């Protein structure tokens, strides 16, 4: 067994479980923390996470725990893989066990409403002295569990952190690429959920491949336009965390955001769409936050404007669909053609 690094993965959902299992297969000591004691005990007995990734056999050396202190205290890398809505509450519990030498990494894709904070920025609030990183990309957990070839990005301004995460996670089916643009990488992961709603909408209305292609590329333009204004590197959006994540989210009918858009395209209201889904899709909340931020910064985001009118203001779906791509910048590729 390789004792170079010790890893803690916080969150036993699908992606956290998959990542922890990869670390174990790579020969590093790893603990996976779950809040649910019954599920943790079942996983210890059966070596399967039946709730989130039932088809994945868990490595014998993957230690499953419910004691947060035990999970974190001996680790040199701590990966937080919990939903964004639970993120700050978890950090309140974890802060007593974190030391400044530990590498802290988040996989959560969301924006905290009050101050438009990404999860790595929330980590910075609690742990300003720790090196911080972000894992993001086109990473459907069930496909990673099935060992489909997958690429992801570890973004951090700390080179040692980037190298360590590559060491513990890279394997023959999971390729880990490095970036120093943490903000752009993370913002891309949050913004793409909005455009999956638009993709579902266009599919429900029978729009063709030409329309889908245009929708994806104009979505990428909008994402990068806002992100660069807020300090991101535009080149980040040409990579896995930008266009890669956008494609997989907008092309997957299994995506919650896509399904909300599809229901809206069928003429259903937001409440009905959410009731069918059983929960609010992340993109619905992100849409309201991004609309507010774009208005404040005076950033032109016609897709966001159209979707907001549909989702929150009850606009007619046919009218919105026709207007989604009519009010836009006149340049094809952002940041190439100078605007007059």
Image (spheres, rainbow, N blue to C red):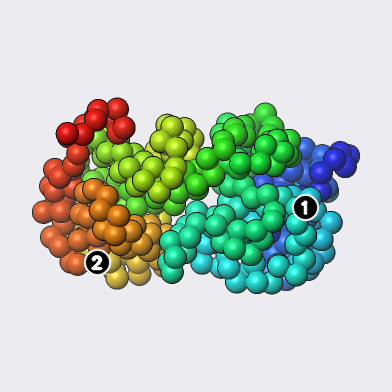
Residue 228 drawn at (x, y percent)? 39, 42
Q: Nearer the viewer, residue 214 or 208?
A: 214
Mark found first going from the N terminus, 2 or 1: 1
Residue 251 lies in what quarter of the image? top left
Number of the front mark, 2 or 1: 1
Q: Which mark is residue 101?
A: 1
The residue where tag 2 is placed is 312
Residue 210 lies in what quarter of the image? top left
Q: Residue at x 88, y 42 (%)?
A: 3
Residue 51 visible? The answer is no
Residue 55 drawn at (x, y percent)? 63, 48
Q: Is residue 2 left or right of residue 122?
A: right
Q: Is residue 249 left or right of residue 29?
A: left
State if disc 1 and disc 2 touch (CB < 8 Å): no
Q: Residue at x 71, y 67 (%)?
A: 94
Residue 145 drawn at (x, y percent)? 62, 43
Q: Nearer the viewer, residue 242 or 1?
A: 242
As drawn, which residue projects farthest toward the front? Answer: 340
Image quadrant holding the C terminus, namely top left
Looking at the image, residue 174 lies above or below residue 136 = above
- Rounded to the nearest whole Å, what is the CA distance between mark 2 and mark 1? 45 Å
Image quadrant holding the N terminus, namely top right
Q: Is residue 92 left or right of residue 272?
A: right
Q: How busy is the neighbourhood of tag 2: few (under 14 within 10 Å), some, or many (20 plus)?
A: few
Residue 290 visible? The answer is yes
Q: How busy is the neighbourhood of tag 1: few (under 14 within 10 Å), some, or many (20 plus)?
A: few
Tell me the element at label 1.
loop
Q: Residue at x 77, y 66 (%)?
A: 97
Looking at the image, residue 337 lies above or below residue 297 = above
Looking at the image, residue 119 lies above or below residue 90 = above
Q: Residue at x 24, y 35 (%)?
A: 214
Residue 289 drawn at (x, y percent)? 36, 62
């Amino acid at each position: 067994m390789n004792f170079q690094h010790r890893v803690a993965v916080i969150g036993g959902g699908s992606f956290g479980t998959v990542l922890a299992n990869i670390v174990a297969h790579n020969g590093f000591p790893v603990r996976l923390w779950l809040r649910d004691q019954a599920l943790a005990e079942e996983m210890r007995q059966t070596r399967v996470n039946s709730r989130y990734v039932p088809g994945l056999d868990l490595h014998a050396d993957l230690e499953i725990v419910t004691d947060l202190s035990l999970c974190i205290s001996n680790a040199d890398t701590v990966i937080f893989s919990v939903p964004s809505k639970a993120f700050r509450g978890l950090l309140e519990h974890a802060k007593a066990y974190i030391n400044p030498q530990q590498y802290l990494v988040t996989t959560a894709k969301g924006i905290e409403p009050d101050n438009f904070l990404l999860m790595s920025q929330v980590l910075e609030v609690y742990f300003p002295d720790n090196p911080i990183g972000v894992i993001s990309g086109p990473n459907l957990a069930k496909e990673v569990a099935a060992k489909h070839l997958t690429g992801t990005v570890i973004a951090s301004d700390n080179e040692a952190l980037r190298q360590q995460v590559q060491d513990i996670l890279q394997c023959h089916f999971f390729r880990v690429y490095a970036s120093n643009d943490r903000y752009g990488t993370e913002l891309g992961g949050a913004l793409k959920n909005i455009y999956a709603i638009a993709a579902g909408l266009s599919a429900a209305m029978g729009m063709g491949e030409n329309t889908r292609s245009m929708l994806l590329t104009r979505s990428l333009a909008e994402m990068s336009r806002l992100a660069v204004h807020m300090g991101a590197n535009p080149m980040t959006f040409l990579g896995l965390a930008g266009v890669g994540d956008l494609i997989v989210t907008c092309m997957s009918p299994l995506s919650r955001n896509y399904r909300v858009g599809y229901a809206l395209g069928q003429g259903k209201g937001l409440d009905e769409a959410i009731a069918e889904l059983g929960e609010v899709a992340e993109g619905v909340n992100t849409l309201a936050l991004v609309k507010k931020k774009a208005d404040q910064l005076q950033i032109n985001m016609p897709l966001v404007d159209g979707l907001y009118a549909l989702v929150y203001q009850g606009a007619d779906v046919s009218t919105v669909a026709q207007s989604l791509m009519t009010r836009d910048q006149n340049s094809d590729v952002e940041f190439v053609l100078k605007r007059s």
